[in-house]
Image (cartoon, helix red, strand yellow):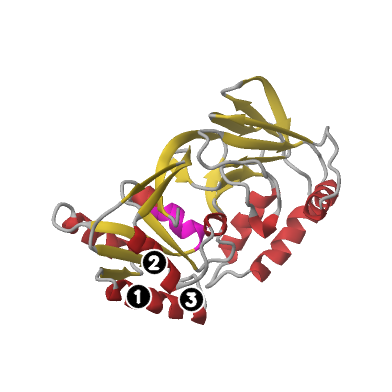
C-alpha cells in the first residue's frame, strides 16, 4: 500500500442519474455543502460529456483535488477509465458498492467531505481487461449471464431484487459453457464452467469467492469452478455462502499477473462482466497494473 496526498481547490462530482434513492440525493447535497464549508469549489455533473469537456478546459488552469464517483462500482470504473490521472473519492449510491465497502466508506456526504479534506491517497492495483480498466473483478459464466440480462432489462435504478429472477434462471436452467484458462505463472491449461479474476475479497451478495485477495499486492486472484451442471453450481454457491466445506476438486485457486480466457465448447459466444457491468464477448485478456488507481481514503 502506498499512501500520499493531493492538493487543489476544485472537487468535481459525477452523479450516475440511474443510481441512488431519495436518501442518496440528500447525501449528495450534504456532500456539496460540506465541501463548500471547507473552502472547496464544487462542480456537479450528471452528463459525462459535459464533465469531460469541463475537465479538458480546466487542465492547467484549475487545480482539481479529486473526482467524486456518486454511484455504484460501475460509476467508479467508468471514471478511472476516462480520467486515470485524477484521484477518485467514492460516495456509494449503487446496489452493491463493493469497493466502498472494502475501503470502509458509508453513504454519508459529511464523512466523505472529511476524507477529501484530509487529502490522503491510497494507491491500489487495477486490472486491464480487453483494453478497459476493472477495479474489482472480471468473470465469465452464470454471473456474467446475469449481469447481461439485468442490464438488458434495465429501465432505471437497479436494486438487489432486480437480480433475483436472472440469478435463479442462470443457476437452474440450461447447460454451462466450458472455459479454458491460461495464466502467466501457470504452464498448465485449466478449464472450468465459472472463472472469477478478483482484485478485492468482496463479491456481490457477500459471497467469499476470493477471501484472501489483496488490492495492492500486484497480483490477480483467480478462481475456477469445475462443475458441469447448474444445480450443482447452485449447491456450490449455497455452501460457500453458508460456510460449509467445499471439495478440493471443485475449484482451482491461484494468483497471476496476467490471465487469458476463451470459451471452448458450445459453439455459442460467451459474455464476461467486469465490476458488475457487461464487458462484451470472449476471448478475454486480463493483466494487472500495480498501483494504477488513486483513491482518497481515511488512511
User: Magenta span has 214?
Assistant: no
User: Magenta span has 73?
Assistant: yes
Rounded to the nearest angstrom, the CA distance separating label 2 from label 3 is 18 Å
Q: Look at the numbered discs 3 and 1 and tell me whether their residues touch, using CB distance below 8 Å.
A: no
Res 24 label: 3
**Residue at 33% in and 67% down:** 47
Query: Mark 2, residues whose alpha carbon is within 10 Å: few (<14), some, or many (≥20)?
Result: some
Q: Look at the numbered discs 2 and 3 and tell me whether their residues touch, using CB distance below 8 Å.
A: no
Along the viewing direction, whichever of 283 and 4 lies nearer the viewer: 4
Quadrant of res 76: bottom left
Q: x and y percent of residue 32 in the render?
A: 34, 74
Read off the residue under disc 1.
Answer: 34
Q: For the magenta stretch, what is the residue range?
A: 72-79
Q: Secondary structure at mark 2?
A: helix
Q: x and y percent of residue 283 in the render?
A: 56, 35
**Residue at 55% in and 61% down:** 97
Q: Tag 1 or tag 2, which sits nearer the N-term?
A: 1
Q: Look at the numbered discs 2 and 1 and tell me whether their residues touch, using CB distance below 8 Å.
A: yes
Left or right, 134 with reference to 52: right
Q: Nearer the viewer, mark 2 or mark 3?
A: 2
**Residue at 53% in and 66% down:** 94
Q: Tag 3 or tag 2, which sits nearer the N-term?
A: 3
Along the viewing direction, whichever of 81 and 289 lies nearer the viewer: 289
Rounded to the nearest angstrom, the CA distance separating label 2 from label 1 is 8 Å
Left or right, 205 with reference to 5: right
Res 114 label: 2
Q: Secondary structure at mark 3?
A: helix
Left or right, 181 with reference to 50: right
**Residue at 83% in and 33% down:** 248
Q: x and y percent of residue 26 in the render?
A: 44, 81
Residue lying farthest to the left in this orientation: 61
Residue 25 in view (yes/no): yes
Amino acid at each position: 500500500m502506498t499512501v500520499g496526498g493531493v492538493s487543489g481547490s476544485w472537487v468535481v462530482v459525477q452523479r450516475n442519474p440511474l443510481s441512488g434513492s431519495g436518501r442518496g440525493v440528500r447525501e449528495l447535497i450534504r456532500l456539496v455543502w460540506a465541501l463548500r464549508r471547507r473552502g472547496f469549489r464544487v462542480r456537479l455533473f450528471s452528463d459525462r460529456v459535459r464533465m469531460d469537456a469541463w475537465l479538458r478546459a480546466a487542465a492547467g488552469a484549475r487545480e482539481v483535488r479529486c473526482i467524486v464517483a456518486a454511484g455504484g462500482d460501475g460509476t467508479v470504473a467508468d471514471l478511472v477509465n476516462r480520467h486515470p490521472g485524477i484521484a477518485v473519492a467514492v460516495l456509494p449510491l449503487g446496489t452493491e458498492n463493493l469497493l466502498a465497502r472494502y475501503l470502509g466508506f458509508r453513504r454519508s456526504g459529511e464523512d466523505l467531505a472529511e476524507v477529501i479534506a484530509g487529502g490522503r491517497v491510497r494507491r491500489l492495483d487495477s486490472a486491464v481487461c480487453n483494453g478497459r480498466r476493472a477495479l474489482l473483478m472480471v468473470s465469465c459464466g452464470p454471473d456474467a449471464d446475469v449481469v447481461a440480462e439485468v442490464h438488458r432489462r434495465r429501465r432505471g435504478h437497479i436494486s438487489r431484487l432486480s437480480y433475483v429472477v436472472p440469478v435463479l434462471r442462470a443457476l437452474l436452467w440450461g447447460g454451462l459453457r466450458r472455459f479454458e484458462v491460461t495464466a502467466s505463472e501457470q504452464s498448465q491449461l485449466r478449464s472450468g464452467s465459472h472463472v472469477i479474476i478478483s482484485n478485492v475479497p468482496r463479491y456481490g451478495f457477500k459471497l467469499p469467492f476470493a477471501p484472501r485477495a489483496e488490492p495492492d499486492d500486484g497480483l490477480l486472484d483467480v478462481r475456477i469452478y469445475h462443475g458441469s451442471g447448474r444445480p450443482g453450481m447452485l449447491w456450490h454457491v449455497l455452501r460457500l455462502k453458508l460456510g460449509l466445506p467445499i471439495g478440493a476438486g471443485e475449484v482451482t485457486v491461484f494468483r497471476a499477473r496476467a490471465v487469458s480466457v476463451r470459451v471452448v465448447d458450445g459453439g455459442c459466444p460467451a459474455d464476461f462482466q467486469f465490476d458488475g457491468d457487461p464487458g462484451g464477448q470472449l476471448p478475454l485478456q486480463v493483466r494487472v497494473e500495480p498501483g494504477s488507481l488513486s483513491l482518497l481514503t481515511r488512511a
